[in-house]
Image: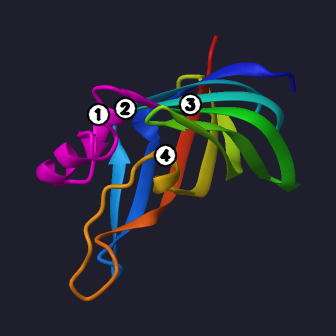
Amino acid sequence: MAKTKWAIDTAHSSVEFSVKHMMIARVKGSFDNFSAAIEADPTDLTTANIEFNVDAASINTRNNDRDAHLRSADFFDAEKYPSLSFKSTKIVKTDDDEYEVTGDLTIRGVTRQETFTVTFEGQGKDPWGNEKAGFSAEGKINRSDYGLTWNAALETGGVLVGDQIKISLSIEAIKEA
């Protein structure tokens, strides 16, 4: 199959993350607004071009005060850096439907190379004749690498917010006409 253009069906996709809180539990959140420009043969991602953008202000942890703090200069500084972006630079097939996708991740004006495990979940037509493809992606980054260093020490030792962020994407893409 040839490379074709795909867009994200945001109604059937999600961008989620989790981080350790108080060194004992995980707090989960998501971003509500995101988009992508994808040129790919879904059955062979090794030649794909993937550009992904996330609206930093769309962060949602189900707590308004925490979300406001995460949008502030202490964390994402969403007013100054309105988007988080990823652009693929290298894709290696590691199993039948699995890939290591490496690219440039930019958060808060800092760009670093990161690798995510991407799984091709399948492809088919919806009831209206639209060609769809499903993907999932998992990865981990260190928030301090991107200048997200705010924290508070705990009386019992350790810190309030962990450094490692687990990222999880579930993507349903729609073939562009």
Q: Residue furthest bottom?
A: 156
Mark 1 or mark 2: which comes first in sequence?
A: 2
Answer few, some or many: residues within 10 Å of disc 4's Cα (few below 14, many 20 plus, some between 14 and 19). some
Please state which of the two labelled residues, at mark 4 or mark 2, is closer to the viewer.
4
Mark 4 or 2 closer to N-term?
A: 2
Q: Badge 2 is on which residue?
A: 33
Closer to the camera: disc 3 or disc 1? 1
Query: What residue would you read off at disc 1?
Result: 57
Q: Is residue 17 above or below residue 124?
A: below
Q: CA distance from mark 3 to mark 1?
A: 16 Å
C-beta proximity under 8 Å, tags 1 and 2: yes
Does any portion of residue 43 appear in the rendered image?
no
Image quarter for residue 139?
bottom right
| Span shown in magenta | 56-84
x then y, percent, for residue 99: 78, 50
User: Relative to 21, is 24 above or below?
Assistant: below
- Secondary structure at badge 2 equals loop
> Nearer the viewer's eye, disc 1 or disc 2?
1
